[in-house]
Image: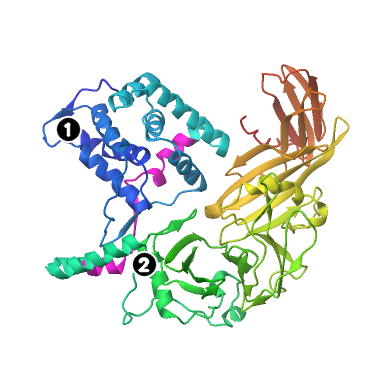
Amino acid sequence: MEPSAPPARAETVFVRQYERLVRLAYLVAPAPPGRQSRLVRAHRLVHRALPWRARTPLTYPELVVRVLRRAARPHRRALPVVVTWAWHTPLPGSRAHRELDEALATAEPSVRAGYALTMLENLQARDAVLLLQQAGWSDAVRQLAAASALRQRIFEAYGLSPEHQRHLLSEAPADPTLVQLRAPDPLMIRLWRGTRLGAIALATVLAAVLAGGLVFGVPGTRGDQEQLQVRRVAANAWSKATELTLNTWPTRGARAGDDALLRTALTAWYGGRLESVHVNGGPPSEPPQVLYAGDVDGTTVAVLADPTRIATYTEKGTEWALRVEPAPRPDGYAASAIRLTPGRYLLAPWVAGVEVGDLAADDWHRLEMTDGLTEPGPPPLESEAGCWQGPLLRLRSVEVSRVGPFTLADLGTAALAHVMYVPTRPSTDMTRPAELDAGTGLWRRLGCTVGGLRGTAAESVTAWQVWTGKVRDASAQVACVRAALPGDGNRIWAVAQVGAEAPAVVAEATGTRLCSRLARHIVVGWWWQSPAGDWYHVAVGSRDVKSIEVTVGGATKRGGTAVTSGPYPDKPESPATVRATGRDGRSVPVLPTPPR
């Protein structure tokens, strides 16, 4: 965008640059509740920026200023968005899209505006400051500096480089002009039909009822004469299935036959007023399956599921809530349990027994279960440092694992994460990670790392003991933690511990096959400061690494699976270059070091 571009008719600029203008409004404007409302508001802001006079001459930057001024205004409570022929929702994105969106949501509108102008419009700092000032932000230089700091914070927190951020902003999930159309709320359709038929009085009454429902936060119910569009599964359906998935779970709970409760939960899901966790929050893609309906510890709970999501509806007194989250991945391990409420779990019909434990101890305590629902277990556990410690569930099922129990971790979402480990020297016939072995002590050191996965709906977490040895006469070890996330996303961390020091993340990456069975050869390099204050660069590799070469300040040192360079009185300013070769003669990838 060039501020000196010649003016044209406002409507011409509006039509030609509409997509860019809506992107700006979508990023800068305060986000109202609900993705649909945010999307609609971005379009409305751009519409209102269009001058009344059709022939008004405007440059694109001048129209940008008009959009920014409106986007910066405090969000006023507006009437709900009513769409009678289809719900329009933004396209679902990857975990990186969600992380970027969450990070931007915490910034002030002026900072988001500076971020959008430099990242989305590719403006130079001088031109961005000029537009920010014209939009009404007098301290534009400080706002632009804050935008630059925001860009760096996103890099440090999520590993998203500025170029990666810019790429994410240009992709379809971040484009409010690209949407998915989903089934609307049937209640809204009926209201609209009544209005179109001219029944003004009836429409007024219905609108008042609807408004009352919105004010008091109680979901509406459909007429009893309407057929309930849900799917109930028989108790023995799983025993006839060829695959053990959530789809084969029976419908359970004392209120599984309560159509009024299920109708209310379903209406809430169709209504879209819900908390959506790392998943598209739109209505169910098909008549959902009823997993559970009953009263749990004084709270009424109804759990519905479509092929990819779990919707948990809860009522307590006059309060209600609906939370939509990713369903467990379709395998017998991950689909063996879901988190119903904190400390309570619903187990698959093929689970014969369950125990609960944590990372801090080796002892496990048996949990009794009735009709698949466990007795109350311990709440989420944290160490004194705030690191995640549990709960962990150890389940037994001969249908899933004939060699022993398997372990699932409660990381705060409905789907539990299957936790596993890989030893330093796995057996040659090992085709998948082994189950969690608390006796190795490896997982005890990973609570702070795994804690970063709370609320992400991680599908599995595997810890691989990459290397053990010595660094300057101190025992040391390096592990690679790999998390599989919804939507085929992933994240990995290399965790190093030297001597009695606390484990530290020394390298990380996202969207990679490293530390998986498809890329088992890796090297990790990091800077370490000894207790005496000297600095060393340490590079270690997995067992299939033949040689490592490290260059620091023009000096090169070579070795086998571990190379320590130093000591240095101060940490060198020049970066260390690490190269490695495997036993097959090929280059071995080096995990990137996180920014500091």
- Judging depth in this view, the residue of 254 and 397 nearest the camera is 254
Which residue corresponds to the image point at 49% horizontal and 79% vertical from the top-left? 256
65 lies left or right of 438? left
Q: Secondary structure at mark 2?
A: loop
Give amino acid for label 2. Pro
Say which of marks 1 and 2 sits in front.
2
Residue 306 seen from this side: no
- Judging depth in this view, the residue of 432 and 526 nearest the camera is 526
Q: Is residue 379 above or below residue 172?
A: below
Question: Counting other residues with Cα less than 10 Å from the Cα at mark 2, is it few (<14), some (14-19), or many (20 or more)?
Answer: some
Give amino acid for label 1. Ala
- Judging depth in this view, the residue of 543 and 327 nearest the camera is 327
The quarter of the image holding the C terminus is: top right
Is there CB contact under 8 Å for labels 1 and 2? no
The quarter of the image holding the N terminus is: top left
Q: Is 185 inside the magenta-drawn segment?
A: yes
Q: Position of residue 304 (x, y in %)?
A: 48, 70
Q: Secondary structure at mark 1?
A: helix
Which residue corresponds to the image point at 45% horizontal and 80% vertical from the top-left? 258
Q: CA distance from mark 1 to mark 2?
A: 44 Å
- Judging depth in this view, the residue of 17 and 29 nearest the camera is 29
Magenta part of the protein: which range? 165-191
Q: Position of residue 590 (x, y in %)?
A: 68, 35
The label shown at residue 25 is none
Q: Is 593 inside the magenta-drawn segment?
A: no
Q: Position of residue 339 (x, y in %)?
A: 59, 64
Which residue corresponds to the image point at 82% horizontal and 53% vertical from the top-left? 440
Q: Is residue 521 above or below residue 330?
A: above
- Image quarter for residue 147? top left
The label shown at residue 10 is 1
User: Mark 2 — residue?
Assistant: 219
